């Protein structure tokens, strides 16, 4: 019986950890210190892309044309897939990664580009790193200085953006149409998606903890209550079985003694 109770307590403890562990995972679902830039159908010669934000007078994030940008390089990762024949006709895939970094001159085309929209990399004191992984879509991660602003704060401030496709020397090959993303102050995974000249932004807020916490807590409480009831039922059932066995044993013993007195 003691072993049963200990096992049941262990199960309840494990389930509790799982429930609250999942809540913690949801709480860290959003990255608000990066822009994730995806693009395809880019012009020939495109090596990377940059976000262009609408110019503001007295731009609080802006830097002058002669000032040094906090980031003027792009880390490139190219994945090559090799298929090899395995055992029993099954193939397996190996990937090799080629990495290199390109440095851009502060007087390159992207740095000088101005059609009412200017470069995040060169004209704002915000981005700290650019890294690209290729595929059907090119995934480019633009890391931000978290001390300066979050992705939604930046987007809300400028109100409109474009994407510039650039070659290895920073020349602008093509620019997308402008897009006005939603205004929000919620933490979000911020996806900027370019397809040729078209552009859209997807803001993935993940789980809204302020609204979902109550429902999750109530659900967890109900679930734990059900487990508790089931545990009580099992314990009562075990006690009844023990009582019945004891009675059966006594009855059998009394019957044996009765037969012994009267052969």
Image (spheres, helix red, strand yellow):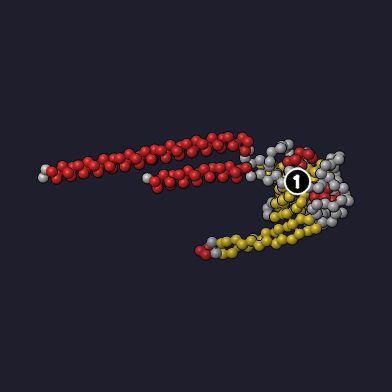
Q: Position of residue 259 (x, y in %)?
A: 14, 44
24 or 95, nearer to the observer: 24
Residue ID at (54%, 35%): 218
Q: Is residue 180 in view from this perspective?
A: no
Q: Secondary structure at mark 1?
A: loop
Bin the neighbour count of mark 1 within 10 Å (Cα to Cα): few under 14, some 14-19, many 20 and up.
Answer: few
Q: Going by the picture, which residue comes out furthest to the left?
A: 263
Q: Position of residue 233 (x, y in %)?
A: 39, 38
Q: Position of residue 135 (x, y in %)?
A: 68, 54
The residue singled out by tag 1 in the image is 147
Q: Quadrant of residue 250?
A: top left
105 lies above or below 241: below
63 or 167, nearer to the observer: 63
226 lies above or below 191: above
186 or 220, nearer to the observer: 220
- Image quadrant where one finds the C terminus: top left
216 lies above or below 63: above
Residue ID at (88%, 51%): 66
Q: Is residue 231 in view from this perspective?
A: yes
Q: Quadrant of residue 169?
A: bottom right
Q: Position of residue 68 (x, y in %)?
A: 85, 52
Residue ID at (73%, 43%): 150
């Amino acid at each position: 019986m003691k072993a049963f109770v200990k096992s049941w307590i262990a199960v309840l403890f494990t389930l509790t950890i799982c429930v609250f562990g999942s809540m913690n995972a949801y709480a860290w679902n959003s990255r608000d210190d990066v822009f994730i830039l995806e693009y395809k159908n880019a012009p020939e010669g495109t090596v990377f892309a940059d976000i262009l934000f609408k110019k503001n007078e007295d731009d609080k994030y802006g830097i002058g044309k002669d000032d040094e940008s906090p980031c003027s390089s792009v880390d490139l990762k190219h994945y090559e897939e090799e298929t090899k024949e395995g055992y029993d006709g099954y193939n397996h895939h190996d990937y090799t990664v080629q990495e290199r970094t390109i440095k851009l001159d502060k007087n390159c085309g992207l740095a000088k580009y101005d059609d009412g929209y200017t470069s995040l990399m060169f004209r704002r004191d915000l981005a700290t790193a650019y890294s690209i992984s290729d595929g059907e879509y090119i995934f480019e991660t633009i890391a931000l200085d978290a001390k300066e602003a979050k992705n939604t704060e930046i987007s809300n401030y400028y109100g409109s953006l474009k994407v510039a496709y650039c070659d290895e020397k920073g020349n602008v090959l093509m620019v997308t149409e402008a897009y006005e993303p939603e205004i929000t102050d919620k933490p979000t995974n911020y996806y900027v998606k370019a397809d040729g000249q078209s552009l859209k932004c997807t803001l993935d807020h993940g789980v809204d903890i302020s609204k979902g916490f109550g429902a999750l807590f109530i659900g967890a409480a109900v679930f734990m209550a059900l487990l508790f009831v089931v545990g009580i039922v099992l314990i009562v059932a075990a006690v009844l079985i023990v009582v019945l066995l004891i009675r059966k044993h006594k009855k059998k013993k009394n019957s044996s003694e009765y037969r012994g007195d009267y052969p």
